[in-house]
């Protein structure tokens, strides 16, 4: 009797694993919507806090709800002394994503409130993470620069407060806006690897912090969120705009993956790129600095060369990487900035997964040795 081997979908490519009401990429128009709203309109007209509310509650907040949401977020920002001291003891040789992963795990261990799996309990925990993660990221960047942490300022909005905690000042509104746009664009992207990781952990009825800790680990990799950092390393490696084509040919010949290019879902370009690229262009123009212009020229030259050689478009990490550099953040802190935003999407998916849970447990097509007898010990 012959049995046909089951069809294998490596990397789960093309597999529809569940339904979701949170976001979708509309292939025909190459657009991304959060709860039905086009992300470019959200980025142009709404704050990151409003988008977080939208992802969690399904609707944009009215002014009273937004006031309440903002007040609660601002009150939750400070870290307690024990947490700060524990995180400050982690070696500076570890990656900032390791600090963030440890921080989420620590928050979970310290949280005395019950995780009954209800949306209300999850939203409270999600808001705590949204409020505290920037405090962790900013303090970690400062300690690596040999500087003391700056406490959060409850008088400032989410994006402004983050700059304040990192640098002790808030930059011009254009720079803050560019950062806020990146947060809106990074917030959610359906069943990407880190979100799916969070859903897998949740599907076992584990807790929210465990799911987010695992998601941070999945995002760290350079094929996913780690690419925004890798983009900057790559631009530093190339150095000169005149070297872009030659460098690319060498990298492709060596079968290297070019960071910040390609996407599993988009085949004709990431719908978020034009919005982020516009914001980046404004930052470059505003800087009016020859060094900045040179980096932007290199960035554009590599994009053109990649399109010509391989027909592959950039993904969001490509413009976001350079934008974060121009905003003054240290390169290893780029992926943690992604976490500060994606925490909203992850936690929305955790709540959704629990609402109609099914254990996520695929099958494998076995191609190891055939069954054989265990030999007697020699
Ligand atoms: C926010 C985000 O997480 S966006 C993704 C960020 N990640 C990156 O930028 C890392 C670089 N990009 C990649 O590695 C890939 O494009 C991924 C992982 C994002 C998507 O990968 P997949 O959907 O599995 O596509 P896959 O890797 O099969 O690529 C298809 C073909 O395009 C090529 N390709 C795709 N992306 C790239 C790239 N960045 N550099 C060079 N070649 C590429 C592959 O080599 C492959 O060619 P082949 O058919 O000749 O073997
Ligand atoms: O969707 C993906 O595979 C990766 C991505 O762009 C994201 O998570 O924002």
Image (cartoon, helix red, strand yellow):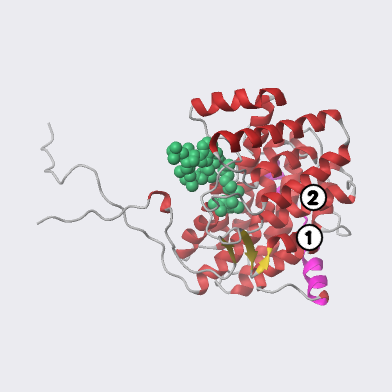
Residue 332 x %, y %: 67, 37
Q: Going by the image, does 117 lie left or right of 53? A: left
Residue on which disc 1 sits:
44
Q: Is residue 250 visible?
A: yes
Q: Going by the image, does 20 lie left or right of 43? A: left
**Badge 1: how crowded within 10 Å, few (<14), some, or many (20+)?**
few
Q: Nearer the viewer, residue 4 or 243?
A: 243
Q: Is residue 283 above or below residue 105?
A: above
- The answer to whether mark 1 is within 8 Å of ligand 2 is no
Q: Nearer the viewer, residue 68 or 176?
A: 176
Q: CA distance from mark 1 to mark 2?
A: 10 Å
- Which stretch did the figure color magenta? 64-88
**Badge 2: how crowded within 10 Å, few (<14), some, or many (20+)?**
many
Residue on which disc 2 sits:
178
Q: Going by the image, does 355 lie left or right of 294? A: left
Residue at x-position 52% and y-position 74%: 355
- Judge whether residue 325 is colored magenta: no
Query: Which quarter of the picture shows residue 51?
Result: bottom right
Query: Which quarter of the picture shows residue 317?
Result: top right
Residue at x-position 64% and y-position 57%: 343
Residue 216 x %, y %: 58, 50
Magenta stretch mostly in which secondary structure?
helix
- Judge whether residue 72 is colored magenta: yes
């Amino acid at each position: 009797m012959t049995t046909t081997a089951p069809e294998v979908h490596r990397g789960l490519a093309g597999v529809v694993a569940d339904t979701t009401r949170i976001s979708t990429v509309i292939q025909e128009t190459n657009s991304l919507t959060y709860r039905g709203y086009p992300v470019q309109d959200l980025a142009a007209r709404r704050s990151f806090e409003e988008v977080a509310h939208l992802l969690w509650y399904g609707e944009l907040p009215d002014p009273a709800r937004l006031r309440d949401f903002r007040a609660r977020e601002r009150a939750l920002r400070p870290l307690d002394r024990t947490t700060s001291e524990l995180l400050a003891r982690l070696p500076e040789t570890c990656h900032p994503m390791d600090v963030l992963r440890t921080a989420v795990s620590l928050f979970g261990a310290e949280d005395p409130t019950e995780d009954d799996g209800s949306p209300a309990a999850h939203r409270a925990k999600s808001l705590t993470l949204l409020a505290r993660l920037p405090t962790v990221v900013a303090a970690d960047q400062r300690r690596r620069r040999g500087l003391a942490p700056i406490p959060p300022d409850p008088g400032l909005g989410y994006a402004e407060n983050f700059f304040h905690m990192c640098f002790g000042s808030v930059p011009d509104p254009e720079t803050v806006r560019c950062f806020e746009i990146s947060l809106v664009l990074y917030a959610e992207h359906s069943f990407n690897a880190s979100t799916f990781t969070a859903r897998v952990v949740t599907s076992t009825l584990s807790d929210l912090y465990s799911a987010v800790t695992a998601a941070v680990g999945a995002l760290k990799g350079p094929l996913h969120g780690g690419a925004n950092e890798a983009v900057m390393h790559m631009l530093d490696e190339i150095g000169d705009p005149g070297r872009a084509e030659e460098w690319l040919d060498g990298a492709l010949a060596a079968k290297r993956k070019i960071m910040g290019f390609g996407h599993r879902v988009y085949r004709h370009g990431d719908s978020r790129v034009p919005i982020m690229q516009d914001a980046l262009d404004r930052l470059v123009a505003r800087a009016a600095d020859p060094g900045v212009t040179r980096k932007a020229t290199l960035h554009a030259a590599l994009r053109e060369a990649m399109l010509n050689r391989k027909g592959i478009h950039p993904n969001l990490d490509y413009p976001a990487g350079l934008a974060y550099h121009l905003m003054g953040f240290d390169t290893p802190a780029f992926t943690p900035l992604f976490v500060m935003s994606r925490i909203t999407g992850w936690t929305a998916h955790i709540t959704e997964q629990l609402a109609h849970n099914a254990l996520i447990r695929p099958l494998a097509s076995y191609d190891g040795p055939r069954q054989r007898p265990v030999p007697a010990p020699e």
